[in-house]
Image: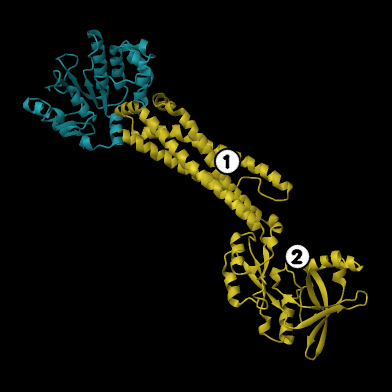
Amino acid sequence: MLNNLLKKLIKASTGRSRFILAIVGLSVALLLILAAVQIQVNYNDLLNSKTNQDSVANFLVINKAVTSSNVGATTLSNADIDDLKKQPFVDAIGVLTPSRFKVSAQGASDRIPFYTDLFFESVPDEFLDVNNKNWKWGDQSTFIPLIIPNMFLDMYNFGFATSQNLPQLSQELVMSLPIQVNIKTPLGNVNYYGKVVGFSDRISSVLVPQSFMDWANNKYGNDADKARPSRVVIRTKDAGNPRLTNYLHEHGLTTDTDKTRFSKYRQIVTGVVNVSWVTGAVMLLFALLIFTLFIQLTIATCQEEIALLVTLGTAPKQLQRFLMKQFFPPNIVIVLVVLAIISLLQFLLKRILDAQHFYVNGIISLYTIIAGIIILIVLWLVNYYTIRKYIYLQR
Amino acid sequence: MFFNIIVPLYMTISLNNIVPVPLKEKFLQRGSDVWNTEITFLKGEWVKIKAPSGTGKTTLVHTLYKLRNDYDGNVRWNDKTLRTIGDDELALLRQQNVSVIFQDLRLFPNLSARENIELKRVLQSPFYESNRIDEMAARLQVTHVLNQRAGLCSYGEQQRIAIIRALMQPFDWLLMDEPFSHLDINNTEKAASLIAEECQKRNAGFILTDLDEDTHFEYTRYLNL
């Protein structure tokens, strides 16, 4: 009842157009800020969620770029590796151990005759993208399991085989072929049997189990110094992290650029998000300013009424409460409407991205809602202190 | 025989040598029962202060109601110095302990007469139900203007609305500044009897300032300003 009477006395009609302007400005500002939060969340979703992991590489093989000035000196020192390990974008690092002996392979049967000089590398199992129960080696093993790059088979099947009139080979066929592995020692060749147990998309090298590599290097290796690693594999949450790309560039390192290409998109997205942030923040500031002025104007216009109300015994607190009820609820409505709009946009975005096999959450993120609540708290504080200031200024 | 220990919850108003600063010279030369003296009003006293024009009648009422602070000396409500009372405490006193009828009436011209009264009724938890407005209006013969904008009412009607408004709240003291200046004898008597009843109901005192002597109330104290 008191509020109805106060409403008649303290009319906010004088600056109605300014008020609408402030509301529009605040809405746009909130839309920009909350959209920036939501875009950032979506982007992180795309990078890190399980369903999208295959679309974004997160294992990178890193080596020094071979240039005319460092030919023959591309090994990585312990300091290089340690420094890389310390970088925040590196979750784990695995050294590719090269073989320190000469090795060749040939067809073990006459059915598919071939001969090739070869090298082996090994890498800790956790960095492999091949899961095969035969991927193990011990003293009692009858064969050496090998992993070859998928790319090799593709090169053979679609380049070499067709041009040389040779049969194409399926993965299954290759895996069933017995291969004779010859290790050259000063005392002559030592023969083993090898078998391809898997194909890797991640590491472009002929891989043997670490246990075999250690054992063989120990037994047949010639020169310890020559065998410093030249390549490492790292696991990273985000191969598109611009800091990673920059680090590699600064240290003369190189990797599969196809996998880091994402960093360019990432920079663009970051740029868009930042512009949205800044614009939104500036607009929010102006909207707050207009709101403050509007409150000030309303109180100043009703100066006489407020003075008489206080004379009659209205407590400044009562007036403050009343004015808060007048000015604050529109802010709540704005935040709710903006959150609803972003929910709708998010839903539409999900439908568009689903068609392209990118998966984002169709529901607005918790961070966006939290950001909305934080802005609402800021609005409340600004309203509260402005009203307080000008009510007491009237006294 | 019973010995009751009475806690003095009732309000006293005491003046310690108050003199309004703008009129200081003038007032100090002239003898007065109020200015520049020690004086205490106990609750329940009906005080008449007779004051010719220009002796500071309105200044006194405004000073007692804390509308102005430009005076020497101190005013105390109970034991609180009026000068140092905070805004919210002052509002509470005006809602619960002290009511006022201004000489210049001070109604909101854009609210109806009823709304003006209603505002005072609901400013605190109501002392009276809203039908009491109609009863009082009927007694003072202003029922016909209740729904009219206060700004359109005659001074006589406005004065009666202002009186009813002042009686809508609880109070220990009622301050009145020429409360009947716009009323004829008949209406003055009706208003005075209503005020007397309401004061008795609350066991409240009043301080009334006027130009002339009168017999509207059974005053317990009579002072010259």
Q: Position of residue A320 (x, y in %)?
A: 38, 34
In the image, the chain rendered in yellow is A
- Residue located farthest toward the bottom when viewing the structure as drawn: A187
* Among the 4 quarters of the image, the one containing residue B17: top left
Mark 2 burial class by Cα count in 10 Å: few <14, some 14-19, many 20+: few
User: Relative to A106, is A153 above or below?
Assistant: above
Q: Is residue B83 left or right of residue B138?
A: left
Identify the residue at horizontal 57%, vertical 65% (top origin). A88
Mark 1 burial class by Cα count in 10 Å: few <14, some 14-19, many 20+: many
| Pointer 2 or 1: first along the chain | 2
Residue identified by numbered label 1: A339
Q: Position of residue A188 (x, y in %)?
A: 81, 89
Residue identified by numbered label 2: A201
Residue A174 visible here: yes
Kind of residue indicated by mark 1: Leu
Which subunit holds the residue at mark 2? A
